[in-house]
Amino acid sequence: MLLKVVVLGLTTCASALNARSYRVDIPHHGEASSKIAQRTLPIFSPSGSLNISSLASDINSVISSSVQVTYTPRPTTINPTIAPYPTKSNGTSTSSAPLSTGTSESCAPYWLENIRHQGVASFNPNSDNYTVFRNVKEFGARGDGVTDDTAAIQKAVTQGNRCGPSQCESSTNTPALVYFPEGTYLISSSIIDYYYTQLIGNPNCLPTLLATSNFTGLGLIDGSPYLGTGTRPGRTGFGPTNTFFRQIRNLVLDMTNIPANVSATGVHWPTAQTTSLQNVVFKMSAANSTQHQGLFIEEGSGGFMTDLVFEGGNYGFNVGNQQFTTRNLTFNNVVTAINQLWDWGWTYSGVTINNCQVGLNVSAGGPSAVNVGSITLFDSEINNTPVGIITARTDNSEPAAAGSLYLENVKLNNVGVAVAGPNSTYLQGTAGSTVIAAWADGHRYLPEGPVEARGPIEPSKRPAELLDAAGKYYTRSKPQYGSLPLSSFLSTRDLGAAGDGVTDDTAALNAALLQAKAEGKILFVDAGFYKVTGTIYIPPGSKIVGEALASVILSAGEYFNDINNPKPVVQVAQPGEQGSIEWSDMFVSTQGQQKGAILIEYNLGTYDSTPAGMWDVHTRIGGFAGSGLQTEQCEKTPDTIITSANLVQECIAAYMSIHITKFAAGLYLENNWLWVADHDLDDARNNNTQITIYAGRGLHIESQRGQLWLWGTAVEHHVLYEYQFVDTRNVFMGQIQTETAYYQPNPDATIPFPPNPALNDPIFAPFTNGTGNNTASTASGWGLRIVRSNNILGYGVGLYSFFDNYSTACSAVGAGAVCQTRIFTIEGDRLSYDINIYNLNTVGATNMITRDNVDLASNVDNNSTFVDTINLFRIDGYGSPSESDDE
């Protein structure tokens, strides 16, 4: 991933907070940074503390210049003695509910703690002696609230020659699940997160990490510390856009012992794809002039977060990242609930803001240098808060398309100013209650444009099939099965699968799935690589959960190697079968040449029951130990013109990542990354060396019924396209993100996969430009292709093309976005209709939207931060232009 880096040039965590200005660089996977743009983010005071007095002055100025309002604080309706903790997730609830912290006597046992732990790191050089599951109490932690448990917890994280910050760029062969039983764990300094680590507590009574009054460090949990030594001195310990495969779940982070006037952070989280925070409570001081913040993110390329609660503090969110999907966030009594440092696109859904001073401050950089690309906020509410949203966007702000804001179904209760600009009120609030049906500020295409407009607009026509009982888009958190006993689970290793990356586990894994289904049990797939040489069949009614994001189904052999006769590695139901499944925390991958491998074929029709779900189910193709698709086999060759004759056939690694067939319906996807590796995660040089892997197609959806939700999904580096929707309908997208293959157009998308008419593959004419990058490619894969489809809704869409034959010159600021000519296409004339795209952000694409081979939107009309931004794009019923929208 490319990244907007916060380069601090300092060597300590304390110094990291002392910088007032940020320099923005754009490095990429496996390469040194390339200076492309500079912005100034006045976030910190010269003294190093968060500039709260300045912020307060700015807020008061906004309020006084915008509107005269009488603000009467109202008590929260929540019992002040009980935090509205996230839901105890048992796979059936879709909303938040209070959760008691409990005691050891009242806390229900959690199956994950007590199940036999026999997961393996299959390709670890010392796999027989490596431990995946680590209970912190087995490493000496007491959890009594008195003993300092810092060292014991850190030992649980680090043991086993693992991939540590500023030492190791990345690794897939040292995964760990660090488990916290119920209890209060006193810590005096940051718990330093390592690569490929899951920090998970008991969801039945959340364990607490309690900071001492003299706590030191940037975050109770520091996901990427600034260190003065090692391979990344003065920078985050891991490259933020390459920090994958990590989770934090089911914890309370308590900073209330730390004096209010001392800076404190709950989690420092500069991360990228395949990362998540879920079911976490942040407790901070609510005293006047508090310096506490819940979540701090300054860079990266995320990512997903859900079910978070913030109490007290100066900031709940203090965040900047390329893109993120965040939902079900609650902020109580925070000065500023969300402070947006920067972004390209950020999607917020299910946000509840209670008794704060400011809901969202998205004014970073000011009108002369807007740093926020776009914000999408919907199905949310702001209560008893003087200012809902502060923006820096004006009629003359720069960049012209930056600061794009889209609101839909946002309820206000006692909010004086709904949206405040730098010098006036853009949207008045109310002392009572009201609902913002839809309101937008930015560049509109309806479908022609751009029309620069600010104000109300007709809301989306939401298909009933995509909504919950309250009329909001359906959501469902990843099930953790906290209420189920250990007897409800079966283990794949107990049932005969080896998971060692060598043994053929095809028969054993299929038998385990059938047995679990027959007995009504949940199949626990112990950590390990399960090599398969034939299709794995998941029957309707299955429930499957992996361990440590390290449970991998690995295809191998000739069965999956016929490009003219592709076969599914995993088949979810057979065509025509109905029912539901739940599948979480696993990967599907390939080993070596696999020209005909469809990693997941999804046929299941779910009609009358709760939608089926796939949470944290990912595809990863190449670039890891055991794949046979690493630097030694597939290192990039940008100086060689690639043709069908000299293309490295051994690096053709997959036919398609996921195929949702015409038979499928009723599928909920959350935090899924379909990644064709652009660099070697287990590079012996510790350099993230770039590699060239060929996989034909990304996510292909042709469900005739649809009813599909894509929350926080990303698809990257396939040959023909990343997302393709054909003859489908009723599809919700919450911040999708793509990257075009770095090697294109050398070769271009015409090789090595011949077009398959049965799959409605796009047709490209060959592009001839040698190994140069002075002309935009006309034959690079589509980021998003929609064909003869309707009721497609995208709330945040990021389509990125950073490279031309491994050079980023084509995407540099001022280069003219010449990596590829087109990136988003809608085809089928009037058979493609009711399409709503909010906050489209593109990189490196000359034309941002194409309809039936006619370009509708050019990048030059929509320059934003590093991206180009369109606030909203609509095609209404039966392909006709929008006529009812206010301008």
Image (cartoon, helix red, strand yellow):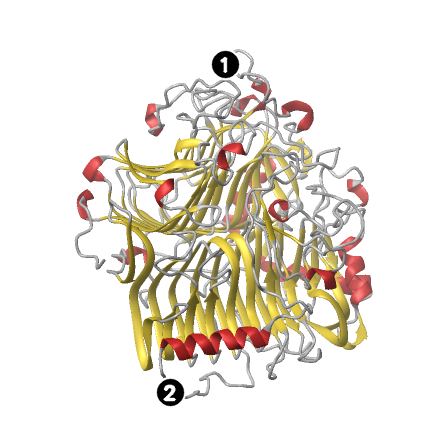
As displayed, is residue 40 above or below residue 809? below
Q: Nearer the viewer, residue 372 or 491?
A: 372
Q: Nearer the viewer, residue 870 or 790?
A: 870
To which residue does mark 1 refer? 644
Q: Earlier in the sequence, mark 1 or mark 2?
A: 2
Counting from the top left corner in percent of width and height, residue 257 is at 71, 79
Residue 94: which numbered mark, if any?
none
Label 1, label 2: how many angstroms apart (C-alpha)? 71 Å
Q: Is residue 865 left or right of residue 13?
A: left
Residue 367 in sight from this viewpoint:
yes
The answer to whether mark 1 and mark 2 are in CB contact below 8 A is no
Q: Is residue 208 left or right of residue 773?
A: right
Q: Is residue 9 left or right of residue 100?
A: right
Q: Residue 742 location in percent, x, y?
A: 53, 31
Q: Is residue 463 left or right of residue 738?
A: left
Q: Residue at x 58, y 64 (%)?
A: 43
Percent x, y for residue 717? Answer: 51, 34
Q: Secondary structure at mark 1?
A: loop
* Local SS, label 2: loop
Please give the name of the residue rendered at 80% of the width and 52% of the height, measured from the top-left corner. 159
Q: Provide the residue designation for mark 2.
A: 70
